[in-house]
Amino acid sequence: MTKAMINTVTISKADIPSGGMKSYKQDDDSIILITRDDNEFRAFDGKCPHAGADLGNGLRCGNRVVCPWHHASFDTSDGSLLEPIATEGLTQYKLTHDGDSLMVDTSAKVTGQVENDKLTDTHTIIVGGGGAGFMTADQLRQGGYGGKITLISKDDKAPYNRPLLSKAFLAGNMNEDKLLLGGADWASSNKIELCLNQTVSEVIPNEATIVVEDKNGNSERQTADFLVVATGASPAIPPITGADVDGVYTLRSMADAKLIKAASHDQRVVIIGTGFIGMEVASALAQAGTTASITVVGQDNRVMGNIVSETVSNALIKLHEEKGINFVFDATVNEITKVDRQVDRDEYDQAFSNVGGVTLASGEHIDADIVVLGTGVSPRTEILSEVNDPDGVQVDAHLQLRDGVYALGDIAKASNQMGRMRIEHWRVALQHGMVTAAAILDDDSVESLEARIPFFWTMQYGKSLRYSGHAVTPEYNILFGTPDTLDYIEYYFDDEDENTRASAASTLGRDKELVAFSELLRRGHAPTRAQLNAGFNMIEQAQALSR
């Protein structure tokens, strides 16, 4: 039972079991989350700071409150952030006991003052303004780092949420200012020197040194006490004749998204690639409703074929086709054809398209005015000397390449719960930032990367498909539910053995079960194929294991 009295809320203690939690939605749309351990109660802001999910609909596993949407995790003792995708912890409120009730005062916040008094005479240089670079800088300051922080980025924007470019911005569902990580004044409020439009031409790991070039070709060497390299990835351009024609786009940056947005009005769009980026671009442009037509061309016979089963893929295809998307499968693009024409753009007066269409290996020609390449990315490791792996930078569990030198994000080949791998997911980049900041601060209270698991999600037409863990192939799977009604969960295995534990799962609509699976996977207790077929209760087991 709850009632709002200005800033004070009265809650019955009997509503909440020991070891549990419950959320209370208020008339002003705010949410209060109460956790209980025996007779110890705590009150928090119940909205996940990442996207506003009601944390009461998530899962409590031991000392962790896990968000049902994107699996951000918070410590039940003080609301501190344990796991991204959120980049900050929960606000805690003061409460008082009144017999069998609790009085929560939402105007009285419990704040722990962090003194920035650690490593005050040091300098940390961060190369890259993506999620990994941002999170490193942010967590350093939140962890009490008092030294100088310089963040260098090729972009002309302060760090922003890149995944939302294809999930929301391109569709017209989110303004540019809402994408900024930490808000518009993040750098100044955290005393971070933000150097935009800067090019780092070389990284010398053994000297913790970088070479920065300006637009005139002048270079300057800079040396740091701690050097963090998070240069990200570049779109992979396939060897297609005409891929360099004006009117062919990739989506990686805000500038890319703006160009695609402006260029696609009343135009015939062809998207090459059926991975989640290609599918998100198709969804976003369809939702924007400004194109003449959208055709997706893929070499495979289904969409997201390396991630989900054919049954789930077919459900996604159906969802897109209902929105007017055309598909051409089992097709190889031989050439992007060119025509001579000028297209006027109000916002981008230099933007024009010479694309006439795409020609397939079969000889079929598809008319197009613009082409978007969704053909994957490659790690930006070219500026790092002594890189020891063609598919990334080999680092330890703390993302360290050399003493005081760290490589993270899309370029890092690091060990997590699933083994050593390079993963191009936003949450992994944020995890890397948390782990690197903790390593610099010598804070062993933050879990290493080896104690974490990957997670990503794709948003298409407002439907969020979420994926936790890592599977080499979706072919060894168990499916529960009906993907056609967008209500399923699917588990993936490395082989067909009955005693093999699931290594990943994806879902639409069964978020709490995926959270429970993720917690079991993180703790090394993912269910076997035999257990799942016997009716394994995922949520019950996750909660029991974490008590």
Image (cartoon, rainbow, N blue to C red):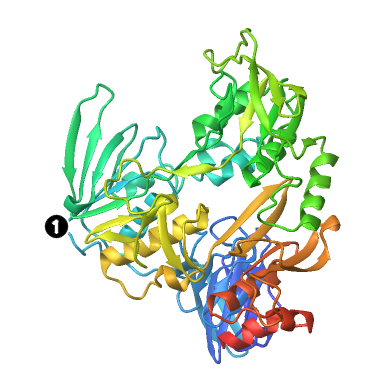
Query: Residue lying furthest front in this view?
Result: 362
Label 1 packing within 10 angstroms: few (<14), some (14-19), many (20+) = few
Count of marks placed on residues: 1
Image quadrant where residue 219 sits: top left
Quarter holding the C terminus is bottom right
Q: In this orientation, does residue 114 appear?
A: no
When the figure is inspected, residue 98 is found, relative to residue 57, above or below; the finding is below
Residue for point 69% across, 54% down:
464
Q: Is residue 512 left or right of residue 382?
A: right
Q: Is residue 319 left or right of residue 437?
A: right
Q: Which of 5 and 246 is in front in this view?
A: 246
When the figure is inspected, residue 414 is found, relative to residue 331, above or below; the finding is below
Quarter holding the N terminus is bottom right
Judging from the image, what secondary structure is the residue with disc 1 in?
loop
Residue for point 82% across, 38% down:
323
Q: Looking at the picture, how far across and down is residue 173, in whole percent?
A: 65, 39
When the figure is inspected, residue 155 is found, relative to residue 67, above or below; the finding is above
Q: Looking at the picture, how far across and down is residue 422, in whole percent?
A: 47, 56
When the figure is inspected, residue 73 is found, relative to residue 412, above or below; the finding is below
Q: Looking at the picture, how far across and down is residue 199, in whole percent?
A: 31, 34
Q: Looking at the picture, how far across and down is residue 63, in whole percent?
A: 51, 80
Q: Is residue 196 left or right of residue 57?
A: left
Q: What residue type is labelled 1?
A: Asp
Image quadrant where residue 201 sits: top left
Residue for point 55% across, 92% down:
38
- Quickly name the residue at label 1: 121
Residue for point 57% across, 28% down:
249
Image quadrant where residue 33 sits: bottom right
Q: In this orientation, does residue 486 appear?
A: yes
Q: Which of 121 and 336 is in front in this view?
A: 336
